Image: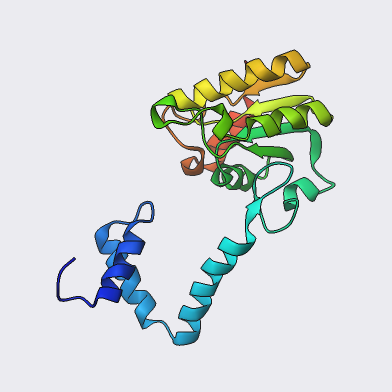
Amino acid sequence: MAGFQAPSLAALIDWFNRLPGIGRKSAQRLAYYVLSMPDEDAEAFANAILDARRKIHRCAKCCNLTDEELCPICKSPKRDKTTVCVVETPKDVAALEKTQEYSALYHVLHGVISPLNGVGPDQLTIKELVKRVNEDDVKEVIMATNATAEGETTAVYISRLLKPLGVRVTRLAYGIPVGGDLEYADEVTLVRALEGRCEI
């Protein structure tokens, strides 16, 4: 880093720069903004990060992020317990929830099968999903992994595990562009993809 900056400022810029989607200039703007905050706001910001890191963990049922044993979706009596939508990340849950069209449960894999990146089925929450289908009254599993080669491979792998259990396995329709991520899709596209899902 340039020698004109204090080491602590350079370190702060470096940390912001490590965040996804944050380039060097944005990292610098964020760092200077944090330094201009009143002390109590900067302290609250730092505490929010630490608090989230200490309290947030995986839901015991769906593996989404929560600060209780079960997330609010799993705890809700209004949710359809017979359908589970399988997504790659917690961000995908947030994207689907924005549509306000899906009223059942989720299961978060925390990734996809990607041998090139050293990620196999055991690194994901696939065992927890199979256990849920075995133990709960699940009738349909919607595969909502992204429309990428890894997402497709993961969907097919999971469907082969679940079909012998007598559960209907469906796939989101291709309202989602190939190579696209759920978190970047608009609500209308997501609704159409949910409505047009098909069995795999």
Percent from the top left, x then y, of residue 71?
A: 72, 51
Count of picture labels:
0
Can you say whether 28 is above or below 139 in the image? Answer: below
Can you say whether 64 is above or below 190 in the image? Answer: below
Percent from the top left, x then y, of residue 191?
A: 61, 35
Q: Is residue 198 visible?
A: no
What residue is at 48 percent from the left and 31 percent from the top? 119
Colouring of the image: rainbow
Answer with the quarter of the image where residue 173 lies. top right
Residue in front for this viewpoint, 35 or 131:
131
Residue in front for this viewpoint, 23 or 193:
23
Residue in front for this viewpoint, 182 or 133:
133
What residue is at 78 percent from the left and 16 percent from the top? 166
Q: Is residue 44 visible?
A: yes
Residue furthest out toward the bottom: 39
Residue furthest out toward the left: 3
Percent from the top left, x then y, of residue 141?
A: 70, 26
Percent from the top left, x then y, of residue 33?
A: 35, 75
Q: Locate the C terminus by quadrant.
A: top right
Query: Is 148 positioned to the left or the right of 86 in the image?
Result: left
Query: Is 174 positioned to the left or the right of 34 in the image?
Result: right
Answer with the quarter of the image where residue 132 lies. top right
Can you say whether 33 is above or below 145 in the image? Answer: below
Query: Is 119 positioned to the left or the right of 25 in the image?
Result: right
Residue furthest out toward the top: 164
